[in-house]
Image: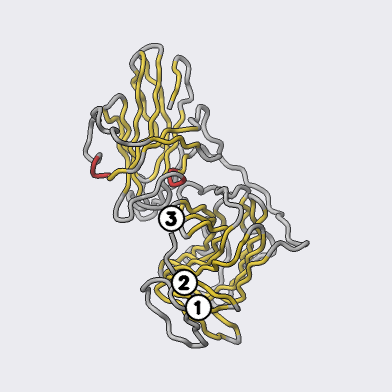
Amino acid sequence: MRHALVPLFLLAASAPAFAQSGEKTFRFMGEDWRVNAQEAKVETIGGRETLILRGGRAWLDKRDFKDGVIEFDASYDEVQGFLGPAWRAESDDRYEELYVRSHLNEKPDAVQYTPVEHGNSAWQIFSDGNAIAAVSQKYDGWNHGKLVIKGDSADFYYNSAKPSLHIPDLKTDIKSGYVGLRVSGRARVRFSNVVFRPLGPDDKIIGAAKPSDEPPNGVIREWSVSTVFAEKDIADALTLNAQAAAGLDWQSLGVETNGIANISKIRDRFPDGDSTIFVRMRIRSDKAQIKELRFGYSDRARLYLNGKRVYYGDAGWRVRDYRFLGTVGFFDSAGLDLKKGENEVIVAISETFGGWAWAGAIEDQSGIALDK
């Protein structure tokens, strides 16, 4: 939930920045912005009214943005950072977002689209050519960004006459909401000529979806997900007793078009530490047999079959080496040694940041029946 606004502060040209000490409001481009950042001020640079932002977000609460165009100029140094617009915000914890990685000029993931659910970005879940793209950035002048949004699709231009990224499927179900700007990492960004406006007659979606990998055959499209508990409660458990799930509530969650369940859609992480949920599946087998379960997850997974742990893995950002992103796919597998009759698969999924995810598929489902 958003905090109450403090009294209005109008920051004139060359006004001092303020340190992060709660939300404040100021006037920029003729509108009142709510900001929570390590640094924020308005200056005139080269005749431009400019918002300087570092380590936080600035929101326009009174803008009800549905379909439309977002444009901005941005100037910054070549340092590790993330900058870009948010739109259709239902709250400060749920919205659509796109950001440029200021340190990855012309790299394949220099720009990223992601939904944000319960305050958790899902960039590790959506990482194909319909969510990331290369952009060419300038470090000695102004970059121009333009985002055209219509329905569930969007085109993003960055210093380009053609879309740098086409997003064919915006992932939230939010139809309208307020808008904002984000800067994080080490970047200190100067924004100018910021525009949020409705679609005009010449504003059209012209990009085309890129091919993406289909989920494997036998993908499981709905999971039963428990309420949240602390990871320490399960961290060292090689077996689960009958009371492990006692007192937890369960809710069904469908997967995304890529076959991956975005757990943050229905579950909120603890604010002061890593959080864990169970996902559950029951398998009735007509005989004793082994079936392959292909799966993916983020960040950590502990897989139990009939109470015994048969897999543990950590796929969090940079846990394997400094280049490891932890993006989610059907990269792992386990042989499920099923007994005749009822079997229970329970997976504990623990999240730090970047996408709370689980995905599973059993291609050969002969002789078995699946149930949540």
Q: Amino acid at mark 1?
A: Phe
Q: Contact (CB < 8 A) between labels 3 and 1? A: no
Q: Contact (CB < 8 A) between labels 1 and 2? A: yes
SS type, badge 1: strand
Tell me the quarter of the image containing the N terminus: bottom left
Q: Amino acid at mark 3?
A: Gly
C-alpha distance separating marks 1 and 2: 8 Å
- Residue topped by disc 3: 119
Question: In this orientation, which residue lies closer to the viewer: 284 or 248?
Answer: 248
Q: Which image quarter: residue 285?
A: top left
Q: Which mark is residue 181?
A: none
Q: Which mark is residue 26?
A: 1
The local crowd at label 2, few if under 14, some if 14 to 19, many if 20 or more residues have their Cα within 10 Å, is many
Q: Which mark is residue 35?
A: 2
Image position, residue 250 (x, y; %): 39, 35
The local crowd at label 1, few if under 14, some if 14 to 19, many if 20 or more residues have their Cα within 10 Å, is many
